[in-house]
Image: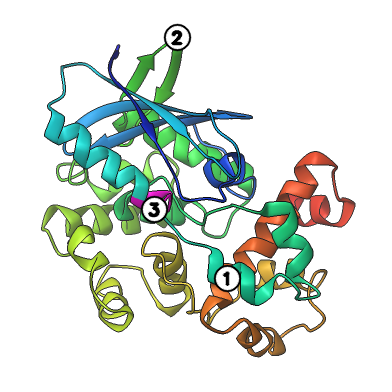
Amino acid sequence: MKLKRQYLGVITPTAPFNFDATFHKPAHFPSGDNFWQPGERWQTFRWQSKNLGAIFRSVGTTQKPKVTVEIFSQKKLTSDFVESFIKEIVYRYNLNFDLTDFYEEFTKDNILGPVIKRMRGMRPGHQDSLYEYLIIGIVLQNCTVGRSIQMMQTLFDHYGPLLEFNGKRLWCFWEPGILEKVSEEDLRSLKLGYRAKFIKRIDDQFKEGLINEEKLRSQDMQTQMKELLKLYGVGPATVWYLLFDVFHQYDFFNHISPWEEKIYSHVFPVTGDRLIKYFDRFGRYKQLAVHYVWEDLWWQHKKKPISWLAKEIRA
């Protein structure tokens, strides 16, 4: 599916702004729907039933940020559509987030202070919709990164369109509900294992309109948690990821996976059950603070491999 450029505009994030640390998260497993290089991010989107390609480029500085955005589509886009899509981009990548209070409170913290200095201007955020985030979460369950990449690509091969824009080809997510006539057995034949059941149930629930992501964004955290727990396969251990990455809640932290705990033990002065209690020191920003430390670690590893982290990744 070849797309043509339909729109070129500028987004002005709040300052300070770190383009690369916001638009590229080294801790995320690589997938075929995006491409990043310093100062530039290519990403496909399924938005309002349209397949889109977008290219984001940093054309400003940390203190005077500007991001150009090119939107590619098969057909001409209305001004209302473009406006709604830009608004969605700003939300997903947290481009209007004011970091002032967070920095003022923790710049002198012995652990967080140096991290803030290195990662200044980074925003938490995620490029995917709630539905897409859940699908990615399912293929990441209980397997190696390589196996997750393989399963995600298999799903793209069968259900996601391949988009070509500005000389690159990238896969795009499918419309929620597209698996209505696909059986669980069909999905299992793609070597998804038990995950086939989860993917099928989640797709059915979104087809039925069980949850309205946009409406849920304006609700309080307890309501968000209650509604998210209605989704098949979403339990307490999953909810906090969703609350942070998709709904931008920063003070909720009640679960650490064994793998994450191993990594945190190299960074924080406490381990095990004491970790969550330790994170209380960051107050209303506990999840944001840990995110900063986590992403900083992976950026350091990207620039100069850390032997113990490389070992954990392979495991």
Q: Which residue lies furthest to the front in this view?
A: 64
Q: Is residue 22 above or below residue 142?
A: above
Q: Label 3, secondary structure: give it.
A: helix
Amino acid type, callout 1? Phe
At 32% across and 57% down in the image, what residue appears? 197
Q: Nearer the viewer, residue 186 or 204?
A: 204
Tell me the residue that label 2 is attached to.
167
**Residue 193 showing in the rendered view:** no
What number of labels is visible? 3
Q: In this view, does 99 lie above or below 207?
A: below
- In terms of sequence position, does the residue under pointer 1 or pointer 2 come before the other? 1
What distance separates the C-alpha of mark 3 from that of mark 2? 27 Å
Q: Which residue lies furthest to the right in this view?
A: 307
Quarter of the rendering occupied by the N terminus: top left
As for residue 92 lying within the magenta part, the answer is: yes
At 46% across and 50% down in the image, what residue appears? 14
Residue 29's x, y, as percent? 58, 44
As for residue 32 lying within the magenta part, the answer is: no
Residue 183 disc label = none
Q: What stretch is highlighted in magenta?
A: 91-95
At 46% across and 54% down in the image, what residue appears? 125
**Residue 82 showing in the rendered view:** yes
Q: Label 2, secondary structure: give it.
A: loop
What distance separates the C-alpha of mark 1 from that of mark 2? 40 Å
Q: In this view, does 215 lie above or below 174?
A: below
What distance separates the C-alpha of mark 3 from that of mark 1? 26 Å
